Image (spheres, rainbow, N blue to C red):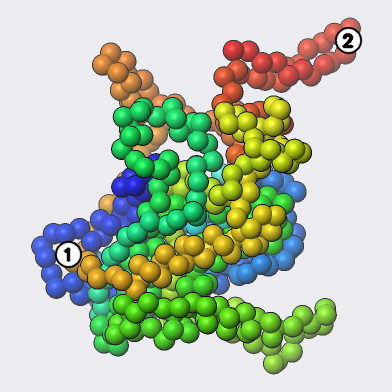
């Protein structure tokens, strides 16, 4: 996937909300909200790597749901977008959120004009999706995880709704350097040469940023950006709840805005982040461990949990066409030899489990998370500070359900095929260099391998059989 192909369906809906039809003056009602959605921090399986042994055992930093709403008027057309520090949203979460919103707002927010998107962090609590395949490793549905996410979405939407005010929206785009590489470059080469020739890289490097400006105060109330890189800076061995690189970028952005005292009059100034980061570091060093004792009343809960009543700046880093884009930009190496993995199969002497990607802070995954987060934050800060292109037009949106199990595909002039019901195949079992899969599977295999049971001399034998 590439530049100009980086709009996921959710982002398509978002952009459709500002279709350039019947020009207006560029003023909307805008509002932002943010709410904690961390969930159970101990003994709960984590969503993303499908690793049954990866259970939460503490917090790297807390997770949030961040929302912005854009409306034409108090009762006019509107669009609500929610960005979650989560692997993904789920149909069940959406249904429950809409039920709660209906009791409060009637039909103002529906499945048509509400989009909920995950950053795709692999370090959040699991157990909140409705399908069995997602619940196998989490050993079932987990109410604590589900309730924390639903409540956070609901409350962040309420904040954004209650703080709607006249404002405008600025759009800016730019390229993020060295925050993602293709984790399956051999597969990419199967794309037609004429298609590959259209692009300078084998991943999409575009960041798209929307800045929301309050007309009355001349200040920004939030900025949401979209960029493709996986939430896998934290490895499948990690046990700490984390928003990964996008969650870190959001924290950096929100803290930078707070300390820079940003306003429209200073928006085009080139800011230095060195002093701000130093201030944050000094502040963090003052927070001491309790040594196992209960936290006293002097503990700054507000600083740690980052409560938000809807009036604080919200900076969100959303996911776009992440596909095979990994933040482990140093490449994939064999854990036994330290040499690069096999190019075509992402394995080491036939063993996929030994082939693992390395982030820029290797072997420190927390440092890698920080570095990739900073690279996104710095580009977002640059786009934020130089944004001048206002969005205008009436608000519109599109929502459709598509049955992907029976779609006709034209392969050539004489051949038409149809899609089939989804299945978990060998590619899923092979995993990726971000999280190796099951032993015995490799990426790019052209053989079909199965376990077969045979009886020999009254003994049942399980054998692994591969056929072309």
Q: Position of residue 96 (x, y in %)?
A: 48, 60
Quadrant holding the N terminus: top left
Circles 2, 1 touching at the beta carbon (< 8 Å): no
| Residue 458's disc number | 2
Q: Which residue does the image show at 34% across and 40% down from the upper left?
A: 199
The reply to whether residue 34 is in sight is no
Alpha carbon distance from label 2 to label 1: 76 Å
In the image, 197 versus 429, the foreground residue is 197
Q: Position of residue 468 (x, y in %)?
A: 59, 12
Q: Which residue does the image show at 42% across and 57% down from the upper left?
A: 176
Vertical comparison of 297 with 138: above or below: below
Q: Position of residue 28 (x, y in %)?
A: 23, 74
Look at discs 2 and 1 and give the one toward the viewer. Answer: 1
**Residue 391 falls left or right of residue 427:** left
Vertical comparison of 90 with 373: above or below: above
User: Of all residues shown, which one is farthest toward the top?
Assistant: 457
* Residue occupied by mark 1: 393
**Residue 299 falls left or right of residue 318:** right
**Residue 247 falls left or right of residue 284:** left
Figure quadrant of residue 272: bottom left
In the image, 248 versus 37, the foreground residue is 248
Q: Position of residue 303 (x, y in %)?
A: 59, 83
In the image, 76 versus 195, the foreground residue is 195
Q: Which residue does the image show at 40% across and 34% down from the upper left?
A: 404
Mark 2 is surrounded, within 10 Å at the Cα level, by few (under 14), some (14 to 19) or many (20 or more) other residues, namely few
| Sequence order check, earlier mark of 2 and 1 | 1
Q: SS at mark 1?
A: loop
Mark 1 is surrounded, within 10 Å at the Cα level, by few (under 14), some (14 to 19) or many (20 or more) other residues, namely some
């Amino acid at each position: 996937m590439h530049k100009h192909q980086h709009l996921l369906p959710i982002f398509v809906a978002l952009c459709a909300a500002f279709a350039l039809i019947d020009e207006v003056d560029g003023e909307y009602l805008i509002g932002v909200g943010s709410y904690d959605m961390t969930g159970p921090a101990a003994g709960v399986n984590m969503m993303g790597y499908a690793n049954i042994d990866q259970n939460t055992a503490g917090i790297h930093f807390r997770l949030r749901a961040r929302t912005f709403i854009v409306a034409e008027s108090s009762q006019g057309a509107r669009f609500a977008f929610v960005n979650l520090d989560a692997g993904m949203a789920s149909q069940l979460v959406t249904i429950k959120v809409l039920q709660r919103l209906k009791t409060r707002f009637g039909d103002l927010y529906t499945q048509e004009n509400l989009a909920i998107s995950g950053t795709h962090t692999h370090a959040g609590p699991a157990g909140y999706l409705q399908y069995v395949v997602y619940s196998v490793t989490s050993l079932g549905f987990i109410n604590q995880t589900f309730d924390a996410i639903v409540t956070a979405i609901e409350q962040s939407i309420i904040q954004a709704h209650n703080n709607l005010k006249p404002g405008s929206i600025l759009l800016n785009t730019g390229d993020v350097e060295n925050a993602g590489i293709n984790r399956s470059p051999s597969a990419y080469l199967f794309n037609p040469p004429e298609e590959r020739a259209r692009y300078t890289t084998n991943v999409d490097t575009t960041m798209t940023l929307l800045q929301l400006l309050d007309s009355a105060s001349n200040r920004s109330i939030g900025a949401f950006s979209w960029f493709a890189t996986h939430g896998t800076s934290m490895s499948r061995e990690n046990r700490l709840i984390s928003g990964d690189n996008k969650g870190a970028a959001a924290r950096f952005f929100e803290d930078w805005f707070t300390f820079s005292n940003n306003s429209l009059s200073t928006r085009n100034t080139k800011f230095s982040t060195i002093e701000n980061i130093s201030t944050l570091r000094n502040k963090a060093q003052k927070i001491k461990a309790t040594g196992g004792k209960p936290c006293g009343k002097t503990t700054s809960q507000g600083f740690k949990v980052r409560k938000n009543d809807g009036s604080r700046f919200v900076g969100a880093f959303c996911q776009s066409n992440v596909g095979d884009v990994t933040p482990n930009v140093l490449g994939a190496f064999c854990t036994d030899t330290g040499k690069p993995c096999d190019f075509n199969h992402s394995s080491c002497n036939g063993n996929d489990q030994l082939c693992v990607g390395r982030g820029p802070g290797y072997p420190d995954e927390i440092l890698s998370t920080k570095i990739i987060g900073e690279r996104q934050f710095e580009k977002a800060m640059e786009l934020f500070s130089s944004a001048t292109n206002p969005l205008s037009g009436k608000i519109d949106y599109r929502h459709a359900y598509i049955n992907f199990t029976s779609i006709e595909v034209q392969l050539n002039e004489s051949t038409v095929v149809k899609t089939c019901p989804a299945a978990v195949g060998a590619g899923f079992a092979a995993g990726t260099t971000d999280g190796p899969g099951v032993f015995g599977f490799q990426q790019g295999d052209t053989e079909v391998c199965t376990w077969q049971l045979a009886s020999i001399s009254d003994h049942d034998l399980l054998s692994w059989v591969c056929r072309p």
